[in-house]
Image (spheres, coloured by chain):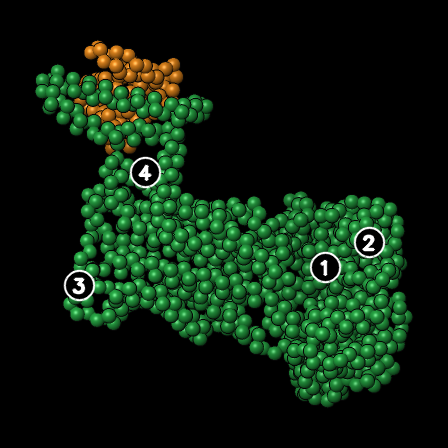
Chain colours: A green, B orange
Amino acid sequence: MGLIKVIGGGLRALFRKQQAERELDEELLAYVESAVEQKMQAGMSREEAVRKARLETGSLEALKEDVRDVGWEAAIESFVQDVRYGIRMLRKNPAFTGIAMLALALGIGANTAMFSVIEAVLLRPLPYSNPNELVRVASTWQRGGITTPYSSSPPDFFDWRDQNRSFSSMFAYRTSEYALTGHGEAKRVRAVMATAGIFSTLQAHPALGREFLTEENRKGADHVVVLSYGLWQAEFAGAADAIGRTIEFDSEPYTIVGVMPAEFRFPLPGSDAYVPIGFDNKVMTQRGAHYLQVLGRLKRGISVAQADDDLGRIMAELRRLYPDKDGKWGVRAEHWSSALVGEIRPALLVLLGAVGLVTLIACANISNLLLARATVRHRELAMRRALGAGRSRLVRQMLTEGLLLALLAGVVSLLLAHWALVSIVSFGPKDIPRLASVGLNGAVLWFTLSVSIASALLFGLMPALRSSASDVSGLLRGSASSSREAGRARGALLIGEVALSMMLLTGAGLLVRSFIGLRSQSPGFDPTRVLTLDVSVPDAHYKNSLALQSYWEEALARLRGLPGVTSVALVTPLPLSGDDFSSSFSVEGKSVPEKDEPSAELRAATPDYFRTMAIPLRQGRTFTDADRQGAARVLLISENAARMFFPGGDAIAQRIKFGARGGYEKNEGEIVGIVGDVHHFGVDAPVPPTFYVPLFQSGIGGATVVIRAQALPTLEQPARNLVQSIDRDALVGEPVPLEALVSGSLGQRRFYMMLLGAFAALALILAAIGLYGVISYSVAQRTQEIGVRVALGATHKQVLSMIMGQGLRFAAMGLAIGQLMAMMLNRALKGLLVGVSTADPATLVVTAAALLIVAALACYVPARRAARVDPIVALRLD
Amino acid sequence: MQGTLDMLILKTVALEPLHGYGVGLRIEQISKGVFRINAGSLFPAFRRLERQGLIKGEWRATENNRHAKYYMLTDEGRKKLKTEAREWQTQSVAIARILEATSGEL
């Protein structure tokens, strides 16, 4: 049968509807007449024949309905009818429509917002061609049974790149910062230093000029740069003759060889300039210097697992060849897209699950409202069935009503989601990649539409089936059994709602508790009223460490002179800054094979650092001004380093050698003191064993100034300007209060806690609305009974406690089930919790109490209404 | 059995154009009262077959000079009837064979 014929027939039927109806009437009339005639010929009287014929044909209206249902146009027609009818019903009950729509819009809106975040952070493909072929290759380091990815060394990278069979290309890079100098104050430039394969691997090519070449990855030939579109526009106003000209970074000239297209970003969220790494002749001896990130592009048809095996094979050989340097290292290949969001993905998925539960609660809520309304509407439905509407027709019509409601709620939810996203972008942590790019795009709109439709089915199906199920006569009479059954269904839904919100509440409670615990934990220093300021000076201006030292000393002295400043010091790298520097070391007189040498974090600081940060001295002394260039080299170590490396308590006066071999800067000295532990990587991360060396004994050109003062805000810009005025080519960062770094290090945790907290609050509100609705409805239904009770002498108090008891029973059951479910499901939260067990009794008690209080409030309002029932009025009802 | 009813209707109107009641009556007569098709099945089937282009209707006067819609087979309906009938034949022979099977044959 031709499709065209089907469509044509349907269209004809739609447009010639009246004629078709008339013909059908006529045809049926003829049928009945023929039947009558036939029966009269068989000898019946006319009356008898007519009666018989009527009986045989049955209801003509129902029959016509069946005939109309043939063909696709009938479905559309009845759908249009249902939509019209649905709109009328929704408008007739503004209170129901309003509450249901609000509940649903909150549920769907939370879902939409959460999905937008997941779409932007997890699902959206990376902005490179064939992003699925891009793989991050990382060295791995066994630490306490956990394999942690780590940066890689140049020789390892070269061996991987040249020996693998899985990658079409591979490059290594590291991010860095330059001061853009040469005109006016130095400006910060985010730079990527990379090997020559960078652009071909990313399959992105300069819009202007060329990429850099393999021979430019050599010291002396490395002063070329490919500019980002943004920097090209800002510095050269987009002039095409910029190619071949020079730009000054850290007071050194770089020749511009290319400009990237405007849409190119690497790494995310982007950089300003791309320069070749300049390796020197000794690079192949630096197998222990791990500082490179490596990305590769898979060959067609090669999987990540195959690439991982391939690299593993090469690494095994390297371990055999270089047991000293590579003995403890492994390698891992992972899709770049998943490596970027490693620990973020499970957290976001937990939140998506939570928000799904909120939507489920909203649906249960609306199911309940619909069930309540169905008892009011049963007469209307029974009437329609008696008039010939089939059961499926009624179900369809009720589902259409639900769909209307859900779509309306979906539209409102987009508004709510938009607001939610605006605040997520402004308050969300900065270290979740691509979070700032969330938005209500096409993918999100599809998701919202699907959730709306799915929830319409979810909340609509049960009430629709239930209210159309019972037989017509029972419906017309409003039979007691069917309403009792409906009551049970409503009770079950309510308990489910309370249970789900209890579960979310427990989860949120655990996150809050874990967060409060972390907040109250000291980072090992006192961050209040301490300002930090990154400063890096161009090497070109300070040819030796003495010149550098006098620069730093002048800066410190002038800062000390600012009003309100109590102490000033330098440190590098600053705790919680995201930077770190670690090195292996040896203890004089204790010889161990090089590969078994312990390693520790290394910090360089000036004498006042410990006073400024309020890091306590435990033993010995801190640095003094005498610990400078030329004086005997000294070291301080942290408490945990002393415990770990000198369990005999004999740390003081031991001599340490850092990076004695390999290509690092040398550091050695005698331990003169032990200081308190510092959470360098965040208060939620383990405290690393740390060694401190005097900054002036190590010739460092970039450090962070830490300033303790009586008040910070008035200090920020003067301090920055003062430092900048000493050397205008120095790169001086924005002043950041140390407290901001401390709270920023908990940013992701705060974000997850706030989201889950918001979802739990939403769940609680929805459950309260549900409870309120059910109890109110039951009070309305029992008005007469309550009147009788009051007339027979029941006191207000008795009525109140009877109704409250009914509601609280539901709440208590939901609470118990919810806590059981929470204990089972909170395993999903484990990764997000620090120092709190998933069965934390305090959290369970507090959240249960919160739920019961809200439940009691939700029941109290209708219960009070019940207690005020006037028996005379109540008995006169009906 | 919707397919069977459709085939019976096609066969009936293949013999001569008939109106609604006539089709029901004819099926009942030929089947010697085994099949009694009520109006509730008959009219949706007409609409369905008409929409599929297997039968077409035409308003004519009945023998009693009443106005009635007569259904007749289209060319396509004729083809459809032929294949349906052949299939039915093979199936019914097969079913009969299964029902008559004795344990010895199994």
Labels 1 and 4 in the same subunit = yes
Looking at the rendered structure, whether the residues under marks 3 and 4 are on a common chain is answered as yes
**Which kind of residue does numbered mark 2 sit on?**
Glu
Q: Could you tell me which secondary element the residue under label 3 belongs to? A: helix
Q: Secondary structure at mark 1?
A: strand
Q: Position of residue A456 (x, y in %)?
A: 40, 47
Which residue does the numbered mark 4 point to in the structure image? A393
- Which chain letter goes with mark 1? A
Residue A870 badge: none
Q: Give the mark nearest the N terminus, 1 or 4.
A: 1
3 or 2: tag closer to the N-terminus: 2
Give the residue pinned by disc 1: A293
Amino acid under label 1?
Gln
Nearest to N terminus: mark 1 or mark 3: 1
Please state which of the two labelled residues, at mark 1 or mark 2, is closer to the viewer: 2
Circle 3 residue:
A788
Spatial CA distance of label 1 from label 3 is 80 Å
